[in-house]
């Protein structure tokens, strides 16, 4: 199979929108139909499977969607450029190869990992409640490999990510007169106060930290009016459990707490901090691969939360190149990844 040609075809399909995702899934469906392999769309995800669902003990996952388009496909002698080449279409192909070379496995490609993760979240719940799968889920260990740019290291965990909003409401009035509740002033205090929350860290080959970063501030309509509303949105990355509760408790002790509304952005799926706890599997992995931690968020959390699965993250490409105009993948690394994912898939099966 010409994996490099498949990668080129997928990268040339722009998938930062629903229409493009459907086009890419049609491409994959045609590919698997030609191979005689069952495939369908479930909860917006592309699924391919072999054999009976109740016998599945391995899931290979990656995502087809990308961030907003930044760079077209370009091939040089030793590398290829293009939005999604490592995040994560190159890793879609690694997961395809792992699926094609193992038994009792299922391939699931996410449609919206870069935005809502609604597809994989609902698919995991669908699988959990499926009668053929549900009967056996507690009787076996389900292993999942999630394809993300890890620089060919096996990541045994990832950061959680949340969007935390703080809003303040006041009364609009002439700016010449003092205001007891100026929403902009209170939101400014919130931003400065939250910097004092004690955050934890974890250590692998280096130290990874939780973070709470203000990213969007809104408020005010005119320079001579004290506004009646202001807000700040925080990007929260966690390497600890219950960080959101920590933020809630911290703000609840502030004098301005009765003037603000704080909490997670509604109608979103958020992946919490995840770390592999299977000691036996950890030892096997560390004996055969370089072990690391994924310094971002991915969908491994959902497989663990809903399916009680042991999930690891693996793939080609360096994370810092993702979401950039310089996103590229060395062809030699791509084929090494294809070879190594087969080894990794067999290892987690033993």
Image (tube, grey):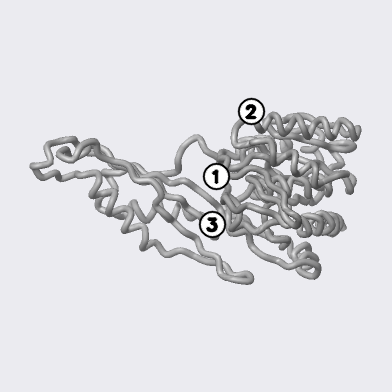
Disc 2 + disc 1, Cβ < 8 Å: no
Q: Label 3's element?
A: loop
Q: Position of residue 308 (x, y in %)?
A: 71, 48
Query: Which quadrant is home to the N terminus?
Result: top right
For marks 2 and 1 on the same chain, the one whose residue lies earlier in the sequence: 2
The circle on residue 3 is none
Residue 213: x %, y % from top left: 42, 55
Q: What residue is at 86 percent from the left and 56 percent from the top? A: 346
Crowding near the residue tagged with mark 2, few <14, some 14–19, many ≥20 C-alpha atoms within 10 Å: few
Residue wearing tag 1: 270
Q: Earlier in the sequence, mark 3 or mark 1?
A: 3
The disc at residue 241 is 3
Residues packed near mark 3 inside 10 Å, few (<14), some (14 to 19) or many (20 plus): few
* Helix, strand or loop at mark 1: loop
Task: Give 238 or 141, whichever is nearer the viewer.
Answer: 238
Q: Residue at x 72, y 55 (%)?
A: 79
Residues at marks 3 and 1, CA–CA distance in whole angstroms: 13 Å
Cβ–Cβ under 8 Å for marks 3 and 1:
no
Q: Position of residue 180 (x, y in %)?
A: 15, 45
Residue designated by label 2: 19
Q: Quadrant of residue 155?
A: bottom right
Q: Is residue 326 left or right of residue 129?
A: left
Residue 139 in the image: above or below residue 37:
below
Indicate which label's residue lies in the foreground, 2 or 3: 2
166 sits to left or right of 181:
right
Q: Nearer the viewer, mark 3 or mark 1?
A: 1
């Amino acid at each position: 199979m010409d994996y490099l040609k498949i990668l080129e075809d997928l990268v040339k399909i722009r998938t930062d929108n629903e229409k493009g995702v459907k086009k890419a899934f049609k491409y994959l469906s045609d590919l698997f139909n030609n191979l005689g392999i069952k495939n369908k769309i479930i909860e917006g995800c592309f699924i391919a499977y072999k054999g009976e669902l109740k016998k599945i003990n391995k899931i290979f996952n990656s995502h087809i969607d990308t961030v907003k388009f930044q760079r077209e496909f370009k091939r040089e002698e030793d590398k290829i450029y293009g939005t999604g080449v490592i995040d994560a279409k190159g890793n879609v192909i690694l997961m395809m190869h792992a699926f094609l070379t193992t038994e009792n496995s299922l391939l699931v490609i996410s449609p919206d990992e870069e935005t809502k993760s609604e597809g994989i979240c609902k698919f995991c719940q669908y699988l959990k409640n499926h009668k053929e799968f549900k009967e056996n889920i507690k009787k076996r260990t389900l292993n999942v490999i999630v394809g993300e740019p890890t620089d060919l290291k096996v990541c045994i965990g990832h950061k959680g990510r949340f969007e935390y909003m703080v809003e303040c409401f006041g009364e609009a009035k002439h700016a010449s007169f003092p205001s007891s509740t100026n929403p902009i002033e209170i939101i400014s205090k919130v931003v400065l106060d939250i910097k004092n929350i004690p955050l934890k860290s974890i250590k692998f080959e280096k130290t990874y930290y939780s973070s709470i970063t203000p990213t969007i501030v809104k408020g005010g309509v005119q320079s001579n009016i004290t506004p009646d509303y202001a807000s700040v949105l925080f990007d929260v990355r966690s390497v600890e459990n219950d960080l959101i509760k920590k933020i809630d408790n911290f703000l609840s002790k502030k004098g301005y707490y009765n003037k603000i509304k704080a909490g997670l952005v509604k109608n979103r799926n958020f992946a919490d901090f995840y770390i592999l706890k299977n000691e036996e599997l950890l030892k096997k992995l560390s004996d055969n691969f370089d072990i690391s931690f994924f310094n971002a968020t991915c969908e491994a959390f959902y497989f663990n939360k809903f399916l009680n699965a042991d999930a690891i993250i693996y793939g080609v490409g360096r994370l810092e190149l993702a979401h950039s105009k310089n996103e590229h993948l060395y062809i030699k690394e791509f084929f090494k990844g294809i070879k190594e994912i087969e080894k990794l898939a067999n290892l987690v099966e033993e």
